[in-house]
Each structure stands twice: as structure tokens, then as C-alpha cells.
Amino acid sequence: MGNPAKEELETQLETSTQSITKLEDDAESQTNQIQKQETKILELTQAKEEDSRAIETMKAEIETQAQQVQNLTQSQTELVTASEELQSQLDVKNELITKLEDDVENYGKQTLDTEQQIQGLTQAKRNADSEIQKAKNKIEEQEEKYQHLFENQAKINSDKGAIEERL
């Protein structure tokens, strides 16, 4: 027949070990999520830079077209036709610029949201690390109690043997 206290300690030790394993798995999962978020931030930053380059290219195109408008002012008929065409193109380009500017703003907001998520995940990891440390401390405490009980049992058995010899 097993010692109930020993069995209880072994059960508690097993439970604590499982808790530590789960916390370690959770911490690893959160680390992976943080790495994915950092990759997403990098992708968003690159996309923002590409959008900025596209805006500069479109601005240069618009400036080029404005120069063409000045060159076409020599002929009234050509000026009206070219002006209407260029105005239409300019509107499209401005809409694209507005859309790109909106996209850049959205990417900025997404980056901020992602940074906030990373901060939350970092805090969660800190919390998990704290819980892991608490669990480790509890295991050490349980091991010390178990060792003390084991020593006491050995002493009791020794004293019992001595008493039985005297009788």
C-alpha cells in the first residue's frame, strides 16, 4: 500500500510539471505570433515605401503632362482637346494619389495596431514567464517538502527498529 502523502505529492508534482509544459508551449506560441507580427510590420513598411515611390512617380508624370499642356497652348483647337484629355488623366491620377495616400494612412494604422498587438503579446509573454517561475518555485517547494517527509520517514523507521530491538 502506497503512502498517501507521497502519492499526493507525486500527483501535485505531475500537475505542476504539466502546467509548466503548457506555459512553456504557450510562451513559444506567443513568441511565434510576435515573429509573425514583426514580419507583417516589415511587409507593411515595405508596401508603404513602394506606395511612396509610386506617388513620386505619379507626381513626376503629372508634372510632365503639365509641361505638355503648356506646349499645346500654341493651338486653340489642340489646346481644348489636349486640355480635356489631360484633365481627365489628371483626375484619374489624383484619384489614384488619393487612394494611395489613403492606403499609406491605412498601412500606418495597421502598423500601429500591429505594434500594439506586439506590445500585448510581449506583456502576455512576461506574464507567462512569471507564471512559469511561480510554478518552478512551487515545484521546488514541493520537492523540499517531499525530501523532508522522506527524511522523517527514514528516521521514524530507524526509531521504530530501535524500539522493536529494545522490546
Image (tube, rainbow, N blue to C red):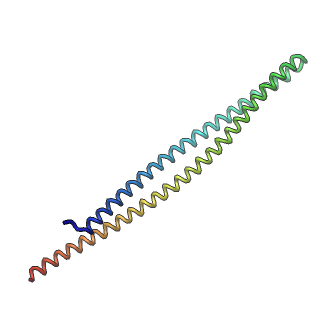
Residue located at (54% from left, 44% from top): 38
Quarter of the image for the C terminus: give it.
bottom left
Question: In the rendered view, does 15 fall on the left or right side of 155?
Answer: right
Q: Point out residue 133 in the picture as x, y percentages from the top left corner.
A: 42, 61
Q: Position of residue 135 (x, y in %)?
A: 39, 62
Residue under the point 50% across and 45% down: 35
Q: Which of the 4 image quarters holds residue 156?
A: bottom left
Where 29 sits versus 60, above or below? Answer: below
- Residue 146 x/y as whole percent: 28, 68
For residue 65, above or below residue 32: above
* 65 relative to 102 in the view: left or right: right
As drawn, is 70 to the left or to the right of 25? right
Residue 44: x and y, percent? 60, 40
Instruction: Please count the marks in the image.
Output: 0
Instruction: Using the rendered view, name the quadrant where residue 110 is placed.
Output: top right
Q: In the rendered view of the protein, which quadrant contains the N terminus? A: bottom left
Q: Quadrant of residue 47?
A: top right
Residue in the image at 46% along x and 57% along y? 128
